[in-house]
Image (spheres, coloured by chain):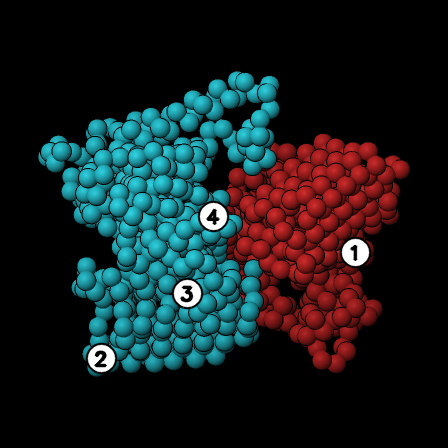
Chain colours: A cyan, B red
Amino acid sequence: MDSVDEKVVAVILVAGPSKGTRFRPLSFNTPEPLFPLAGQPMVHHHISACKKIPNLVQVFLIGYYDEREFALYCSSVSNELKVPVRYLKEDKPHGSAGSLYYFRDRIMEETPSHIFLLNFDVCCNFPLPEMLEAHKAYGGIGTLLVIKVSAESASLFGELVADPTSQEVLHYTEKPETFVSNLINCGIYVFTPNIFSVIHEVYRLREEKAYTRHVPNYESQQFAIRSLPTDFVRLDQDILSPLAGKKQLYTYETTEFWEQIKTPGMSIKCSALYLSRFRSTSPHLLASGDGNRSASVVGDVYVHPSARVHPTAKIGPNVSISANVRIAPGVRLKNCIVLDDVEIMENAVVVNAIVGWKSSLGRWSRVQANGDYDTKLGITILGESVTVEDEVVVINSIVLPNKVLNLSMQEEIIL
Amino acid sequence: MKALILVGGFGTRLRPLTLSVPKPLVDFANKPMILHQIEALKAIGVTEVVLAINYQPEVMLNFLKDFETKLEIKITCSQETEPLGTAGPLALARDKLIDKSGEPFFVLNSDVISEYPLKEMIEFHKSHGGEASIMVTKVDEPSKYGVVVTEESTGKVERFVEKPKLFVGNKINAGIYLLNPSVLDRIQLRPTSIEKEVFPEIAAKGKLYAMVLPGFWMDIGQPRDYITGLRLYLDSLRKKASPKLASGTHIIGNVLVDESAKIGEGCLIGPDVAIGPDCVVEPGVRLSCCTVMRGVRIKKHACISSSIIGWHSTVGQWARVENMTILGEDVHVCDEIYSNGGVVLPHKEIKSSILKPEIVM
């Protein structure tokens, strides 16, 4: 079973622009999967974790963004992490299983024995080698990463019921209205190549139904109501749900952190989780300083090597500072993400906010929010090239790119 | 004769429409905004138009090639690498504006919609023999703008007063100028304001004259003024008895309908409506004071007023859309939804009602 020839391929589903409207205004500039968390693009954390899988030979990013959006990133990450990372563009969304199936020939190029499938918008510890070992022991078609959450939040995700001894998936249901289980699907899976036959079977059955459509049945009506094209196959509802209870699907439970990044505000929360993880995996990435030769650092902070931070500034906890940022004397940054080329002038304060690329914050300006990740305006977001003039206060607001703010505001969306 | 159109920047006030195209290409009365101006310039014999832009030149240039051939007028772009204000762009385009003829050149502000009495302006300019002519327009609330104080009989400009607290006059700068080439010698290639620096200098020498703009004027750079501007524009078409206005039992007041648009039975359209190319208005629809852009489908029994429906959007059956609702490109309002002033960014689906004015990102 543990032969040296057993190759592993990882596939990360990155979706496309239509899903990215939830990440506005930040997604006007950068596709959501490349937005930096803890100083590294969202999917970079996935790919770094994949590197720890023994015999990993290829990583594929599958989505329907334009190839140009991922070209630079793929070549730089392939170089940096020394593993081929390729972006495969779908002509249109095919659904999570449909996308996997659509590119099966590329994915099976090097005849891998196992295929990891990860959703780009999840943030977690990625215990991938452990998942693989567990999967091999179970001997099924697939193993899902799962986590226990509170009963209230469970309904936001896919809930499943697992056998406590065999870890088999007994039942799976997506975003149920009533409580089924507090064990949820993390959006990270490992499969054997048989998964393609399972998906193929679903397509075949649909074609058959389409043929015999002169007998309208409830299901074909359901399809029409949901108006999904027949080649749109979702992994969870269409593939995994039917496989539950058939000794094909298993679970691997993680007790570490897991979040889904659904809004720009959540990226601050997830940045914090990754920064704190750096303490054990890559402590050299975290900044330190006591205010003498370099700025005072509190808690976990990432500062890009090209950024300039004045020693009298106080940074942290949970701050990520990207490339070419200039932080002037007396600045206070807390729980925020500062993107490339931003200039923050003397004595400004930023708390619970994301400051967009090339923006500029004036002296004694204040950009803050109440830090509630679940509300629309709980994290203040400044888009690309926003200027906040001296002494202006911006609270719980979202500002689209290229605006100049010369008046203070609260609870506003500025187009 | 040459002309410069100040196109400027990001058009943020017209978002979400300007998230899809640069502002000059946003349709007004079924035609890109800037086409109204280019056509007016072509009509009085301008042979070359320079667009002073600093945002998305590629998109503009592609579009312009189309116009160039159709209108047989030369269109070039002068691109600012940094914002140069309202006068700087003239210095940047200097070489394109001056030729051996020594003729004056027009400068237009791209946000302005008006009758464009450019021929009359040329005659006015010749008759006073000054260095520069500007159009001024009468407004109700002059202190919102910069007021131009002129000598009643000659139109000679005495001074400019920015947002005056006390009443000094009710004429404001309409954003249409006719300048002698010598004006360019007064403008340096740096961020400069034509109203605050250049014109006061020329006025001090007694060489700046203002003509009162006959007919309507509107700065359509933001949605509320866009809708008012459409009313004024259609009204001026009516005054000219333009054949372009639609007629029929289902039409009230001034309505513009593109020939490729389809309107169903039992609809009531108007007043002050513009329906763009390839639109489909299904039976039983009520439209008033609104703009429906290219490719939009309005489904049965819907009711839309005082709103702008962006390109390729759809409005569902029995939906009610009103009170300055602005739908960006490709927005789909589901059946029976109510939108009271919703401002919706492109590529969204509206599945629940918007009860009070709100931005949907």
Q: Is residue B341 left or right of residue A58?
A: right
Q: Which residue is mark 1?
A: B216
Chain ID at mark 2: A
The residue under label 4 is which amino acid type?
A: Lys
Same chain for the residues at labels 3 and 2, yes or no? yes
Q: Residue at left 60%, top 68%?
A: B198
**Which secondary structure lies at badge 1?**
loop
Q: Is B69 rendered above or below residue B272?
A: above
Chain ID at mark 1: B
Q: Where in the figure is residue A201, as x and y percent of width and height?
A: 39, 24
Q: Is residue A277 left or right of residue A13?
A: left
Q: Residue furthest right?
A: B249
The residue under label 2 is which amino acid type?
A: Asp
Label 4 to label 3: alpha-carbon separation: 33 Å
Q: Where in the figure is residue A388, as x and y percent of width and height?
A: 47, 71
The residue under label 3 is which amino acid type?
A: Val
Q: Is residue A385 left or right of residue B46?
A: left
Q: Nearer the viewer, residue A397 or A304?
A: A397
Q: Is A97 rendered above or below residue A398?
A: above
Same chain for the residues at labels 2 and 1, yes or no? no
Q: Quadrant of residue B275?
A: top right
